Amino acid sequence: MGKNMAAGEFKVQNKSLFCTWKKTIILLILLALCSKSNAVPPHLENVVLQLTWRHQFQFAGYYAAKERGFYQKAGIDVTIKEWEAGVIPVESVLTGKAQYGMSGAGSTVLLHRLRGKSVVVLAAIFQHSPMILLTKKGSGILSPQDLVGRKIIMGPIEANAELYAMLIKEGVAVENLNIGKPGRNLERLIAGEADIVGAYITNGPYFLKERGIPFHVIQPLAYGIDFYGDSLFTSEKELKEHPKRVAAFREASLLGWQYAFENPEEIIDLILEKYSGLESGLTRDYLRKEVEAMRNLIFPNLMQIGHMNPGRLQRTAEIFAELGLIKSGFSLEGFMYNPRPSRFDWGHWSVKIVLVIILFMVGISLILFVYNKRLRREIAERKRQEEALRESEEKYRSLFEKMMDGFAYCKMIYDENDKPIDWIYLEINGAFERITGIKRDVLGKKVREAIPGIKNDVPELFKYYGEVALTGKEADFEIYLDTLKVWFHVTAYCPEKRYFVAVFEDITERKQAEEALRYERDLLHTLMANIPDTIYFKNTDFIDGGPQMWFSGPGPKVLRDI
């Protein structure tokens, strides 16, 4: 019996020891996996990122990715090179001086691609271009047309494509402009060495405000030119030879941008302390203002940072072709980076996680199946509502086009003193074309382009429409346009400030009939006043009151017929 007890105790101890070893092994495996997932890669690949300007929050995402270890975890050691005079980021990347670069505008790197350069855009950081033209208030420069004969400072078309596209679209002959080389743009504007300069909306206005200088902004977006802003790019060579490195660099950079906008004060401290912030004269207030301006261009809380729309790039290229900057028949194939998912390593421990995810998705699918009928009903109802809305829109569009009266929806343009100087046609109907003879291609154009001389011909028309668009008060008036040789009866109202709608009819025939009737009456009265004999009229139509008697003399006298 003692032997049996001893044997039993041995088995219990052996089992306990086995469990202890089992737990230890499992713990070691987990620690190994954790350390593997968090370990810094033993070898870092060296790459260079070339910036388009000096260090500031404009490049915050890359500082965050480097200093917070995102690049290091991706196996990359990144050298961030500040811009220097004469450096062109595209050329630096194509010649191998840098593997990655920042384009001052997404349109710029696109233009290089369409002109034969083998560049690939990885991400559009700025959803709208920050490029603007700045001039001092009171200079008389309010629109692109006012640049003729003025001293202009801005970069070449490869660097400022959106500015040149705006000028060409507005009919300005760029080759005849007096454009100087960029450098200290804002200082030269203040000193009077230039009338208007290219600048970034993220810092240019702040620079002038701090010095108490009133200014006026001309932004391409206001003239229908909406290109991407700062964009991250590389070369086809880099993508072909190091596809994994490209994917890792892009992902780490975007993580850095997300971190920068979530922790702006931390990154501002980093710029001031480590990236020449204080030495270059940057202040905390300046960087904070830059952050807020950038939020309106990047929209980090509304959309994924780096998002690119192929259709928008296609439209940008089409604008380049329309403006003669490139030849037609272009192709964007291979220009926009399309990150592919990496191959799944079935020998990796992560297969277990994948299986768990699959089981979870199966459970979700079963739940979704229960609600499938309800979802289909909702989709059918939505389609019905969309169809009803489409039919309604077509109905009102048909009514709009079949209106007998002319209709024009316009944006009023004022000078710096809120004096109306022009308006832009945004929408017209068929009656507008029929009555005025002006075709639909007037949309987007100014009235002084469509009807030359109209401001001198009928300045009161500008006064009426300007007051309606500015004050919101309706106006009803009759006016003659000598340029068109037409009388109009116009009703104008304001749908929103600085916009107006004009509904009008051609009353030329009525005016001519009234003038003819007035002439006949005047002639008849003249004849009556000069006839010496008495004339009796019974039931006349031109004198109210029934039968009357007229007597000649110094003036006609009327006696009621009794």
Image: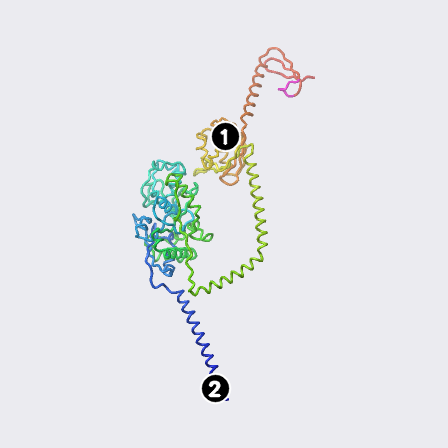
The magenta stretch spans residue 540: yes
Residue 137 shows in the view? no
Which image quadrant is residue 516 in? top right
Helix, strand or loop at mark 2: helix
x, y (%) of residue 549? 65, 15
Residue under label 2? 6
x, y (%) of residue 129? 40, 46
Helix, strand or loop at mark 1: helix
Query: Which of the pair 302/188 is nearer the observer?
Result: 302
Residue with the most extreme bottom position: 2
Q: Please say if 239 is above or below 498.
A: below
Residue with the most extreme top position: 533
Which of the two discs, 1 and 2, labels the residue nearer the N terminus?
Answer: 2
Query: Which of the pair 104/379 is nearer the observer?
Result: 379
Residue under label 1? 436
How has the structure been colored for display? rainbow
- Magenta stretch? 539-544
Q: Nearer the viewer, mark 1 or mark 2?
A: 2
Q: Residue 499 bears which disc, if any?
A: none
Mark 2: which amino acid? Ala
Mark 1: which amino acid? Thr
Q: Please say if 539 is above or below 17.
A: above
Query: Which of the pair 429/377 is nearer the observer?
Result: 377
Q: Is the magenta stretch mostly helix, strand or loop?
A: loop
Q: In which quarter of the image is the C terminus?
A: top right
Label 2 crowd (10 A; few <14 / some 14-19 / many >=20)? few
Residue 340 shows in the view? yes
The magenta stretch spans residue 265: no
Separation of marks 1 and 2 at Cα, in angstroms:
115 Å
